[in-house]
Image (spheres, coloured by chain):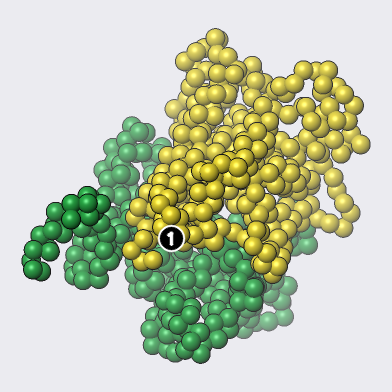
Chain colours: A green, B yellow
C-alpha cells in the first residue's frame, strides 16, 4: 500500500470534456489578457509606455474608416486561407503549403490578367482568373496529397518544400519571361479590367471570403464529405473499416483546400497588389494556419481571430511611425498571443489531479 | 579551375550556416519533435550573436580580442536558441499543443524578436551597428597557417575556412558518435521512434525530448549567428537570413536524419544556393538554381517513402506528441 502511494506522482493528468462553455471562454480570454501583458515587456524595453502603445495600435487600425478598410484588407487573405486549411487539419493532414498554393493561384490569375486582358471583357475575365487560380492552387496541393495517399510520403515536409518551389517560379517569371521594363525585375501592373471591383471601398474579396466562411461551415458540418473528413481525423482505421477510400478523400480534400488558397492568391493580386511578385503570399499561408487552429477550425471564430491579427499588424505600422517602436513588435505580440492561446487549450482539455485531491475522491467513492 | 575552387569555398561558407541549422534540427527531430521554428530560432541567433559581440566590443574598447568575441557570440546565439526552443518544448511536451502550429508560432515570434533586436540596436546606437574591422576579420579569418592554404588546389578547399566550419564538422562527427555509439544516443533515437516503448522500458521520455529540443535549438541558432558574422559582414541583414531556416529543415530530410550526411549535404546545398552568382549555364535561368535544393529534397522524400526501407525513414513518431494516458 505504502509503495503504490509513493509512486503516485504529485500531479496527474486526466482528459476532461465537462468544462462549461462559460469557463472555456474565460480561460481563452484570460490567455489573451496574459499575452497582452507579456507583450508589454518588449514595449517597455524600448522605453515607451505600453498602455499608450496599445492605444496607438487600436487607434491606428480602427479609429477612422480608412484605417478600418486597411485592416480589413489585411484580414481578407488570412481568413480565406484559414478556411482553406480547416478541412485538412480536421483530417489531421498537416498541410503547411498554403503559402505555395496562394502563390500558384496568383501566378495563374496573373497569366490571364497580363495576356488575355484585351481579349476578354471585364467580368468574364475576372471569373476566368478566379477559376484558373483555384485549379492551379488545387493541383499544387494535389501533388503532395497524391504521394501521401499512394506511398504515405510525409505531407508536412512535402507541402513545406512546395512553397519554396512556387516562390522560386515567381522569382523566375519576375526577372525573366514576364518582366515588364527590361532590368526592372518587376511584372507590369494589371490593367483596370483585371482588377477586382470595390464594394464599400474595399475590394470585393471580403464578400467572397465571408461567403466561403458560411459555405465551409455547411460543408464541414452538414455534408457527407465533411463527415468523412471528421472520421478520418479521428481514426484512419475506423474510416477504412467503414469502407471509405481514405486516399481518394485525402486527395479530394487537399484539392478543395488548395483551390481556396489559390482563390485567395487571386484576391491578393487582383484586389490588393495589382501585380505579381515573389512575396505575394507574404507569410499569410503560415499565419493563417495558426488562425485556423486557434479557432478550433470553426469558420466563424476564424473571422474574429483573423481580425485580431490584422489589427495587430496594421496598428504596429502606426506604432512605428508614431512611437519609433519597430513594426516587428507585431510579430512578437502575435507570437506571444499564439503561445498563450495554444497553452490555454491544455487547461481546457485536461484536469490536473493533485495527489491529495485524488485520495479525497477515493474516500468519497467508498 | 580557379572558378571551381572559388565556388567550393563560397559553398562551404554558406554551407556552414546551413550545417548548424541542420545539425540542430536533426537532434531535435531525433526526439520526435518536428520544430518548424528553425527560421525564427536562426533569426534570434543572428541578432543575439551580433548583439553579444557588439556590446562586448563596446565594453572592452580597444582591448577587445577576437577569440573572446567569437566565444561570446557563440554563447549568446546558443542561449537565444535554447530559450526559444524551451518555449516550444514547454508548449508541446508539457502542455501538449500541436507541434506544427507551435513551430510556426515560434517562427513568427523568433523572426519578430530577431528583427526587433536588430532594429532596436540600430535605433539606440543612432545608426550603424557594426564591429571594428579587427573583430570582423577575426570572425572570417582562416585558422590554418598560410603554408597549408597555399598548397595548390587542396589548400584552399580544405584549409581556408573559418573556425565555424571546422567546429561544425566536429559537431557533426560528435553527434554521429553520440547517436550511434552511446547508450544515451540510442535512448534518444528510441524516444523518437516509439515513445510508448521507451516509456515502458523506463526511459524518461519528457527529459530526452526537452534536452534534445533545447540543445538542438541552440545549435541551430549558432547558424544564424555565423551567417550574420561571416556572410553578412557583421551587420544585421534580415533579408539575407530569410528562408535559411526553412532550407535547413529541407536539408534534414535530404540528409535522411544522419549527421555525417549533413557535412557534404550542406556544402552541396550551399553550392546550389550561390551557384547563380558564380556560374551561368546557358538556357537555365539563375532563379531556377535557387529552387534546386527544394526539388532535390522533394525527390529524396518521395524516393525514401517509395522504397520504404526502414533505416531511411523519418523518426516514426515525428510530429506527434506523446501522451502516456492516451497510449
Q: In the displayed orientation, state which residue is furthest to the top.
A: B63
Q: In this view, does B141 lie above or below B106?
A: above
Residue sitting at 69 percent across and 69 percent down? B306
Position of residue A184 relative to residue B184, above or below, is below
A62 on left or right of A202: left
Residue closest to the eye, A356 or A240: A356
Q: Is residue B263 visible?
A: yes
Q: Position of residue B165 (x, y in %)?
A: 68, 32
**Res A330 seen here:** no
Nearer to me, A110 or A236: A236
Number of disc labels = 1
Residue under circle 1? B196
Please, is residue A248 above or below residue B189 in the view? below
Residue depicted at 71% across the width and 22% down the height: B143
Point out residue A203 in the picture as x, y percentages from the top left corner: 48, 70
Residue B260 percent across, percent down from the top left: 68, 44
Q: Give the quarter of the figure containing the N terminus of chain B.
A: top right
Count residues near mark 1 (Cα–Cα under 10 Å), then give few for <14, some for 14-19, many for 20+: many
- Left or right placement of residue B303 versus residue B283 in this view: left
Q: Tag 1, which chain?
A: B
Residue located at (39% from left, 66% from top): B327
Q: In this view, does A366 lie to the left or right of A36?
A: left
Amino acid at each position: 500500500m505504502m509503495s503504490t502511494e509513493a509512486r503516485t506522482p504529485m500531479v496527474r493528468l486526466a482528459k476532461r470534456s465537462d468544462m462549461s462553455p462559460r469557463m472555456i471562454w474565460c480561460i481563452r480570454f484570460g490567455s489573451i489578457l496574459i499575452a497582452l501583458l507579456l507583450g508589454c515587456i518588449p514595449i517597455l524595453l524600448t522605453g515607451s509606455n505600453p498602455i499608450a502603445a496599445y492605444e496607438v495600435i487600436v487607434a491606428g487600425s480602427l479609429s477612422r474608416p480608412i484605417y478600418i478598410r486597411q485592416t480589413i484588407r489585411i484580414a481578407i487573405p488570412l481568413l480565406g486561407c484559414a478556411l482553406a486549411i480547416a478541412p485538412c487539419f480536421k483530417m489531421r493532414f498537416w498541410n503547411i503549403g498554403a503559402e505555395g498554393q496562394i502563390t500558384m493561384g496568383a501566378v495563374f490569375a496573373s497569366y490571364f490578367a497580363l495576356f488575355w486582358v484585351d481579349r476578354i471583357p471585364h467580368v468574364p475575365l475576372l471569373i476566368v482568373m478566379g477559376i484558373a487560380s483555384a485549379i492551379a492552387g488545387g493541383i499544387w496541393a494535389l501533388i503532395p496529397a497524391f504521394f501521401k495517399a499512394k506511398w504515405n510520403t510525409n505531407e508536412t515536409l512535402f507541402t513545406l518544400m512546395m512553397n519554396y518551389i512556387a516562390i522560386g517560379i515567381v522569382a523566375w517569371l519576375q526577372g525573366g519571361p514576364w518582366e515588364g521594363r527590361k532590368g526592372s525585375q518587376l511584372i507590369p501592373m494589371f490593367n483596370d479590367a483585371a482588377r477586382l471591383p470595390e464594394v464599400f471601398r474595399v475590394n470585393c474579396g471580403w464578400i467572397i471570403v465571408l461567403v466561403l466562411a458560411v459555405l465551409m461551415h455547411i460543408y464541414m458540418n452538414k455534408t457527407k464529405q465533411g463527415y468523412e473528413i471528421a472520421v478520418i481525423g479521428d481514426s484512419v482505421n475506423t474510416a477504412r473499416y467503414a469502407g471509405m477510400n481514405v486516399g481518394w478523400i485525402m486527395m479530394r480534400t487537399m484539392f478543395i483546400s488548395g483551390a481556396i488558397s489559390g482563390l485567395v492568391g487571386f484576391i491578393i493580386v487582383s484586389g490588393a497588389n495589382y501585380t505579381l511578385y515573389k512575396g505575394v503570399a507574404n507569410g499569410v499561408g503560415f499565419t493563417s494556419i495558426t488562425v485556423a487552429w486557434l479557432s478550433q477550425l470553426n469558420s466563424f471564430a476564424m473571422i474574429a481571430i483573423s481580425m485580431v491579427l490584422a489589427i495587430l499588424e496594421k496598428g504596429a505600422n502606426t506604432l512605428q511611425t508614431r512611437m519609433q517602436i519597430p513594426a516587428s513588435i507585431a510579430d512578437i505580440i502575435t507570437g506571444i498571443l499564439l503561445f498563450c492561446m495554444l497553452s490555454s487549450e491544455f487547461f481546457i482539455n485536461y484536469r490536473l489531479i493533485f495527489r491529495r485531491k485524488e485520495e479525497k475522491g477515493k474516500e468519497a467513492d467508498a | 579551375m580557379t572558378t571551381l575552387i572559388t565556388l567550393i569555398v563560397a559553398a562551404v561558407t554558406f554551407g556552414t550556416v546551413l550545417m548548424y541549422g541542420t545539425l540542430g534540427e536533426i537532434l531535435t527531430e531525433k526526439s520526435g519533435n518536428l520544430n518548424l521554428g528553425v527560421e525564427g530560432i536562426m533569426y534570434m541567433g543572428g541578432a543575439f550573436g551580433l548583439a553579444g559581440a557588439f556590446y562586448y566590443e563596446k565594453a572592452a574598447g580597444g582591448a577587445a580580442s577576437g577569440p573572446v568575441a567569437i566565444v561570446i557570440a557563440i554563447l549568446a546565439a546558443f542561449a537565444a536558441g535554447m530559450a526559444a526552443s524551451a518555449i516550444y518544448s514547454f508548449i508541446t511536451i508539457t502542455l501538449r499543443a500541436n507541434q506544427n502550429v507551435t513551430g510556426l508560432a515560434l517562427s513568427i515570434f523568433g523572426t519578430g524578436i530577431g528583427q526587433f533586436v536588430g532594429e532596436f540596436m540600430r535605433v539606440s546606437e543612432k545608426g550603424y551597428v557594426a564591429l571594428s574591422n579587427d573583430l570582423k576579420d577575426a570572425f572570417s579569418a582562416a585558422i590554418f597557417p598560410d603554408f597549408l592554404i597555399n598548397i595548390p588546389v587542396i589548400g584552399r578547399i580544405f584549409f581556408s575556412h573559418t573556425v565555424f566550419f571546422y567546429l561544425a564538422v566536429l559537431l557533426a562527427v560528435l553527434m554521429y558518435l553520440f547517436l550511434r555509439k552511446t547508450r544515451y544516443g540510442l535512448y534518444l533515437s528510441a524516444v523518437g521512434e516509439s515513445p510508448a516503448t521507451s516509456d515502458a522500458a523506463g526511459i524518461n521520455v519528457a527529459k530526452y525530448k526537452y534536452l534534445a529540443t533545447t540543445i538542438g535549438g541552440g545549435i541551430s541558432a549558432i547558424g544564424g549567428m555565423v551567417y550574420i558574422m561571416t556572410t553578412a559582414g557583421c551587420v544585421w541583414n534580415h533579408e539575407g537570413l530569410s528562408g535559411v531556416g526553412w532550407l535547413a529543415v529541407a536539408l534534414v530530410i535530404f540528409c535522411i536524419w544522419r549527421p555525417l550526411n549533413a557535412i557534404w549535404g550542406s556544402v552541396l546545398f550551399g553550392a546550389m544556393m550561390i551557384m547563380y552568382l558564380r556560374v551561368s549555364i546557358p538556357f537555365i535561368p539563375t532563379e531556377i538554381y535557387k529552387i534546386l535544393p527544394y526539388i532535390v529534397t522533394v525527390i529524396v522524400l518521395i524516393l525514401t517513402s517509395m522504397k520504404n526501407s526502414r533505416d531511411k525513414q523519418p523518426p516514426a513518431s515525428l510530429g506527434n506528441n506523446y501522451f502516456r494516458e492516451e497510449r
